[in-house]
Amino acid sequence: MELLFRFLAVGQWGFGVVRSLFFALFAGVLMGLLCSLFGRIANFVLSAITLFVAGFFFSAQLVYHDIFKTYFTFYSVRTGTGQVMGFFNEMMAGIWHNLLGIVLFMVPFIWLLIFGRHVMTFRRIDLRRGIVTGAAAVLIECAAILLLLPGGKEMYSAFDLYFHTDSIDQSMAELGLGATMRVNLHRTIFPPEATIPIYEPEDDPGGSDEPDPSLPTEPVVYEPNVMEIDFDSLIANGTDETLKKMDEYFSQVEPTLQNEYTGMFKGYNLIMLTAEGFSSYAVDEELTPTLYKLTHEGFQFNNFYNPIWGVSTSDGEYVACTGLLPKGGVWSFYRSGSNAMPFGLGNQFHKLDYSTRAYHNHTWKYYKRHISHPNMGYDYKAVGNGLNVKRTWPESDLEMMQVTIPEYIDDQPFHTYYMTVSGHLQYTFVGNAMSAKNRALVEHLDMSDPCKAYLAANIELDRALEYLIEQLEAKGIADKTVIVLSADHYPYGLEKEFIDEFAGHEVDETFELYKSSLIIWTKGLPHVEVDRVCSSLDILPTVSNLFGLDYDSRLLMGRDIFSTSSPLVIFNSNSFITDRVKYNAKTKTAESLDGTEVDEEYLSQMKKIVKNKFSMSANILDQNYYAHVLPVPEPVEQTGVPES
């Protein structure tokens, strides 16, 4: 089953194959022993249950991976079981698409039912054989653990994944499904104590010597974006060792500096959107003219990336809204709902007496947004607690704009956040209401139906933005309102062949797959091309700087795009891009981007910086760190009324 699953889903055939087979052999011997401790009938029933559960589990992960391009965890099963029916059509399509794989995973169970009693005795094992079998299982497990050592003990090594770090995608490749889920189950039942693996103080090694022509060049002295935090006092008086280590770390982080763009939007309204499944492929001058206008006027970001994370949409929102990396194995945005989140834009603007609202045109409790979003400083409404839109799948972004804009457009200054849904998979004209609605607009295109359906779904987003700008124009505030838009993740509902079709070439799956568009627009904004590499992690600090908000850049993992600090794009695999290198953590190879040989010392330092950012993000979440160093934001009154 491990080899079949690796072939169908994981697709990596390194030394992890050997480890996964040893772990699988251990599980097989152990379960064989357990299924031979009783009488014949009981042993047969236990064997059947074991094979069915194993086949079902491998099949479930296969289908889940086909839909979401990641794997589920026991935390997700425990937390989000009630949400499965929200993806019923996608689930059925995933089962159909992987039917052969599912049948193959269930073959051992079916064989046992048909032939098992004729071939096997199912007698109770005698004591001597039981001891020998148990000892063999122990030896096999010891051998499997010894096989963790050849890859070292650094972060995301097989050893680290088995004993310390939650990263289910990497773990599947290094350990296999069985060992990964066994470790994940143990950590779900017995959560490990918070650890602070700081590799060394973070000294930014700097970027290339070539200046970015899109950034100001005059030698102006700017102040750092920091807040008054007395780290020395916190360290001297602290009693919690974990918090003290974090204080020591953040006191040494180099802050980003203010710049020419600091406060350029001070006092403006802000509308921020996380657009479901949006990408540069949805931008077309003819079909989606508003998206084309917003991506090509004002700031034009030529090297923006939208990495995917373990909890797809929710983690994508979390990164853009918090400037932190999500913690593996949990729903980070939901977990943050009980923490102080002072840098959330809702909380930042609420402190400045803005009206702050958030909307989502799908189920209000999905991904526990009814907990996370009010905590970010928003009066939150979605379908089921006050947002009334036609219940289709997916729902209309245009209709969401039509029913929500009247609630805030006269309540200035305002900051409104939207999580859209019209661009959601599946990209077909049968199961996607938005694709079907706009089908006539794409029928003339010479491309495959999935590509047409994807464009048709995003036409609804385009019409929503068109309507939004029309309403801002009518109120005379289009030039005093900033629109910020990014995706939650790349459109993984499109098979790779269709993404290649959009791109016109075979897309690199390590980096290029995640390249996307970022919109920061207001009417009349001069055109500025930004070539600096950046990602969704940088959105919060960038917007905070543009609006002149009071924030501390040391406490965020993203960087203000317009600052002079070295750019850094981090991917879930631990790969990264700077202005000097692209580093592929899976192959452990680096490509120079500045025409020089790769500096191994620079590369080593950047690896440590990336590891620290993952580690510190997790510990900010686990330790409620912001409440330790800053005042807790005042809660925002909720006006949404849940349906009875």
Image (spheres, rainbow, N blue to C red):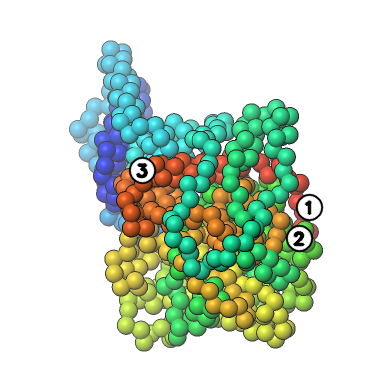
Can you say whether 307 is above or below 458 in the image?
above
Write the residue at 54% across / 54% down: 565
Position in image of residue 472 (x %, y %): 68, 81
Closer to the N terminus: mark 3 or mark 1?
Answer: 3
Please name the residue that numbered disc 1 is placed on.
634
Write the residue at 71% across / 80% down: 477
Q: Quadrant of the C terminus?
A: bottom right
Q: Name the foreground residue: 77 vs 14.
A: 14
**Residue 350 marker:** 2
Position in image of residue 408 (x %, y %): 74, 73
Write the residue at 54% across / 37% down: 201
Mark 1–mark 2 CB contact (< 8 Å):
yes
Q: CA distance from mark 1 to mark 2?
A: 9 Å
Q: Name the foreground residue: 615 vs 530.
A: 530
Position in image of residue 223 (x %, y %): 67, 55
In this rendering, does residue 86 appear at all? Answer: no
Which of labels 3 and 2 is toward the front? 3
Say what amino acid the circle numbered 3 marks. Answer: Glu
Image position of 341 (left or right of 127): right
Please name the residue that numbered disc 3 is placed on.
600
Write the residue at 34% across / 49% down: 598
Q: Secondary structure at mark 1?
A: loop
Say what amino acid the circle numbered 2 marks. Answer: His
Q: Name the foreground residue: 93 vs 279.
A: 279
For label 2, count other residues whose C-alpha is less than 10 Å away and answer few (under 14), some (14-19) or many (20+). Answer: many
Q: Quadrant of the N terminus?
A: top left
Q: CA distance from mark 3 to mark 1?
A: 47 Å
